[in-house]
Amino acid sequence: MSLNLSIDLGDLEQVIPYSLARDIVLKNPKHIVALECPCRAFRANPCLPLDVCLIIGEPFASFIIEHHPKCSRWLTRQEAEEILEVEQAWTCASCLLQRCHAGSILRHL
């Protein structure tokens, strides 16, 4: 299932609500990457799992895979939805879908 609606993305350099994040994933199921969250990885006792930052759309998804192959992986739409659902359930979702200082990028094309 894909959404054929325009979605106002606003400023994506911040945490966005689950419902908007899910809509973005549903609209762009072909180019989704999970990146090890630099915000979590930086902590002495990080929340797990680490690979919860989502990069959606090209050329950003391929860029992350190429330049961070050890800490990123391609996702199916279902895997991305599962990450969003789990992260929504935990209070430790502070860096889900945000731009972190270590260089993760989220863009929607």
Image: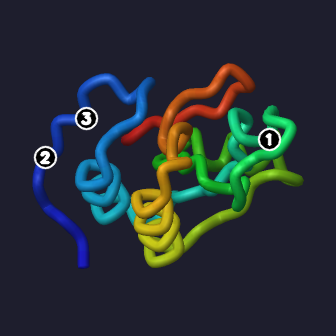
Q: CA distance from mark 3 to mark 2?
A: 9 Å
Q: Secondary structure at mark 3?
A: loop
Q: CA distance from mark 3 to mark 1?
A: 27 Å
* Image point (55%, 38%), residue name: 95
Q: Amino acid at mark 2?
A: Ser
* Image point (38%, 29%), residue name: 12
Q: CA distance from mark 1 to mark 2?
A: 34 Å
* Image point (69%, 43%), residue name: 37
Image position of 64 (left or right of 6): right
Label disc, if present, on residue 6 of the rendered structure: 2
Q: According to the image, label 3 marks what residue?
A: 9
Name the quadrant of the C terminus.
top left
Task: Please provide percent x and percent y for residue 84.
Answer: 44, 61
Residues tagged 3 and 1 counted as in contact (Cβ below 8 A):
no
Task: Please provide percent x and percent y for residue 86.
Answer: 48, 67
Above or below residue 3? Residue 12 is above
Task: Please provide percent x and percent y for residue 97.
Answer: 48, 42
Q: According to the image, label 1 marks what residue?
A: 41
Within-10-Å neighbours for mark 1: few <14, some 14–19, many 20+: some
Label disc, if present, on residue 67 of the rendered structure: none
Q: Secondary structure at mark 2?
A: loop
Give the image quarter of residue 11: top left
Nearer to us of marks 1 and 2 is 1
Image position of 97 (left or right of 49): left
* Image point (56%, 41%), residue name: 59
Q: Amino acid at mark 1?
A: Ala
Within-10-Å neighbours for mark 3: few <14, some 14–19, many 20+: few
